[in-house]
């Protein structure tokens, strides 16, 4: 596809509202994608599953209906590798400026060293009160892309051994998406 970089990227979003129970960490449901270049975002598991190991930028935004005077949320980016789950980033107790008096926005981002076979999802805990995650690409989304693209092939062997513009590793790969 035109403009696609190996390793690609994705933008997944909530296509339906999601009810959250107080004091319960829940995986945010992202049922649709705007783009998903390498089919690495799985809308069934609601997780990014990279096929290329490397550094990735990951970011998410969750818009929460505040009808219950909700004030203390937690949002996490969690990675599962084999059977171990690790928190890559967390944001607690801080909404951005609301769209209106009843809605609040929480954002989170990180740069993560991911391996092929990892699974990354977004978790949300409303803490003290029940809440509703709002649907729509402009409200609740999860996005990511590989940074810098994959490494290029190794340079040719010469009289002094393996050489390339970056030495033994070969040249840099193409620049990642901007």
Image: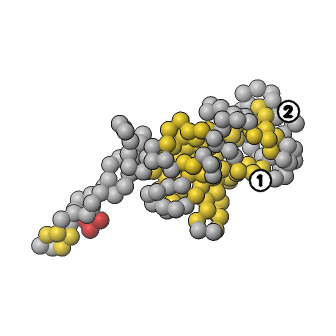
Q: Is residue 120 left or right of residue 128?
A: left
Displayed quadrant of residue 102: top right
Q: Earlier in the sequence, mark 1 or mark 2?
A: 1
Of 126 and 10, nearer the camera is: 10
SS of the residue under disc 1: loop
Q: CA distance from mark 1 to mark 2?
A: 19 Å
| Residue drawn at 29 percent across, 65 percent down | 169
Give the residue at x 74% y 36%. 17
Q: Quadrant of the C terminus?
A: top left
Q: Position of residue 56 (x, y in %)?
A: 49, 53
Decide: marks 1, 2 in contact (CB < 8 A)?
no
- For residue 165, side relative to residue 88 (left or right): left
User: In this view, which residue lies farthest toward the front?
Assistant: 44
Up the image or down, 115 lies above or below 9; here it is below
Q: Image check: 139 left or right of 102? A: left
Crowd class of label 1 (few under 14; some 14 to 19; many from 20; radius 10 Å):
some
* Residue at numbered disc 1: 25
Secondary structure of residue under mark 2: loop
């Amino acid at each position: 596809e035109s403009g696609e970089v190996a390793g690609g990227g994705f933008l997944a979003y909530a296509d339906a509202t999601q009810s959250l129970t107080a004091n319960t960490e829940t995986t945010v449901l992202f049922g649709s994608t705007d783009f998903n270049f390498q089919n690495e975002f799985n809308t069934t598991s609601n997780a990014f599953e990279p096929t290329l190991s490397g550094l990735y930028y990951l970011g998410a935004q969750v818009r929460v209906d505040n009808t219950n005077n909700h004030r203390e949320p937690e949002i996490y980016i969690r990675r599962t590798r084999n059977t171990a789950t690790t928190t890559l980033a967390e944001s607690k107790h801080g909404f951005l400026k609301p769209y209106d008096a009843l809605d609040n926005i929480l954002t989170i981002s990180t740069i993560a060293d991911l391996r092929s076979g990892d699974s990354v999802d977004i978790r949300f805990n409303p803490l003290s009160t029940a809440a509703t995650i709002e649907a729509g690409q402009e409200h609740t989304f999860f996005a990511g892309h590989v940074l810098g693209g994959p490494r290029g092939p190794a340079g040719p062997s010469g009289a002094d051994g393996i050489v390339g513009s970056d030495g033994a590793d070969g040249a840099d790969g193409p620049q990642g998406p901007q």
